[in-house]
Image (tube, helix red, strand yellow):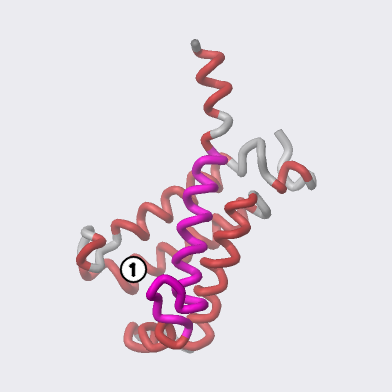
Amino acid sequence: MASQRGGLARWVPLLLRLLLGGLLMAHGAQKLFGALGGPGVSGVAAYFQQLGIAPAVVWAWVVSMLEFFGGAAILIGLLTRVACGLMVIDMAVAILKAHWAFGFDASKGGYELALSFGVVALVLVILGPGPLAIDRAIGVEKR
């Protein structure tokens, strides 16, 4: 039984990558393209301006592209540790600047979702991309 659990455990990073990458791509698409009822880059920039993040337009583009393209990289396992490390920073800033004042509950603007994304990204920094990843195929990650 222990060896079976060990065999299944190696697939955990893949499941986490698919979950985190897909969700981040959706959030990035909201910011970058205005998809799924999102604000688009101009809306993100206006929000960042309200939060005192400057230069707001530059950081709106950075965050929007990071979440969309970083999410895609995580999804396919390309430069996984780098993309996840950047996502940990992104989520830490989001918690501190945008969500902390609203408490934990995400339905009230709280930090629950950003914390979840950040922790999953941190776990992937620690574990690596798992066996089915471009990182493994191109030699960025070894066993």
Asked if the stretch drawn in magenta spans residue 20, the answer is: yes
Q: Quadrant of residue 40?
A: bottom left
Q: Of all residues shown, which one is farthest toward the top?
A: 1
The x, y position of residue 47, in whole percent, is: 36, 84
The x, y position of residue 4, in whole percent, is: 54, 16
Q: Principal SS element in the magenta part?
A: helix
The x, y position of residue 97, in whole percent, is: 34, 73
Residue matched to label 1: 96
Whether 3 is drawn above or below 99: the answer is above
Q: Of all residues shown, which one is farthest toward the front?
A: 36
Q: Quadrant of residue 68?
A: bottom right
Asked if the stretch drawn in magenta spans residue 36, the answer is: yes
Q: On the picture, is 108 further left or further right than 38?
A: left
Q: On the picture, is 32 further left or further right than 52?
A: right
Q: Residue at x 53, y 85 (%)?
A: 58
Whether 58 is drawn above or below 63: the answer is below
The x, y position of residue 116, in whole percent, is: 37, 52
Q: Residue at x 25, y 68 (%)?
A: 109
Whether 77 is drawn above or below 101: the answer is above
Q: Mark 1 falls on what kind of element?
A: helix
Number of other residues with Cα within 10 Å of mark 1, as a class: few under 14, some 14 to 19, many 20 or more: few
The segment highlighted magenta reads 13-41
Q: Residue at x 23, y 58 (%)?
A: 104
Q: Residue at x 43, y 55 (%)?
A: 118
The kind of residue tagged 1 is Leu
